[in-house]
Image (cartoon, rainbow, N blue to C red):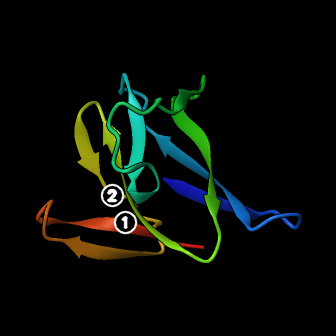
Amino acid sequence: MAITKQYLKSKPVCKVTFSIPAEEAKEVKVVGTFNNWDTKTEGLKKLKNGTFKGTVDLETGNSYEFKYIIDGVYVNDSEADGYLWNDFASAENGVLNL
């Protein structure tokens, strides 16, 4: 799993790229506070090497909770900036600090 951040100089936006190796998976999505946990969001694109990858533009100066959904199963990213307990989900969510 990998998260890369590219801060734009022209505006307070960070391009966050999510990459997750999941060769056997049919679908991988990333959901979080930045998209109101919308599970109907477009999935990440599967590359030929089996990695799913996608980029989201997020406003800087904020923290966002997120998780991956891999074939219907919620998974945290091992490279998140941190983790935060969520009572609603009764689980920890990954955190992005921008």
Q: Residue at x 43, y 29 (%)?
A: 23
Q: Please state if 51 lies on the left or on the right of 74 as rendered.
A: right
Q: Residue 6 occupies which quadrant of the picture?
A: bottom right
* In-image side of 54 versus 9 (left or right): left
**Residue 97 falls left or right of residue 13:** left
Contact, mark 1 vs mark 2 (Cβ under 8 Å): yes
Task: Say which label, 1 or 2, has the lower sequence index.
Answer: 2
Q: Where is residue 58 shown, x and y percent of the image?
A: 61, 58
Give the amino acid type for the residue marked by disc 1 in the picture.
Answer: Gly
Residue in view at x 81 percent, y 64 percent: 11
Whole-percent x and y of residue 82?
41, 77
Residue 64: image quadrant is: bottom left
Q: Amino acid at mark 2?
A: Asn
* Residue plotted at (15% across, 59% down): 89
**According to the image, label 2 marks what residue?**
76
The residues bearing labels 1 and 2 have C-alpha atoms spaced at a distance of 6 Å
At numbered mark 2, what does the secondary structure look like: helix, strand or loop? loop
x, y percentage for residue 21? 47, 40
Circle on res. 94: 1
Residue 29 percent across, percent down from the top left: 41, 37
Q: Nearer the viewer, residue 20 or 7?
A: 7
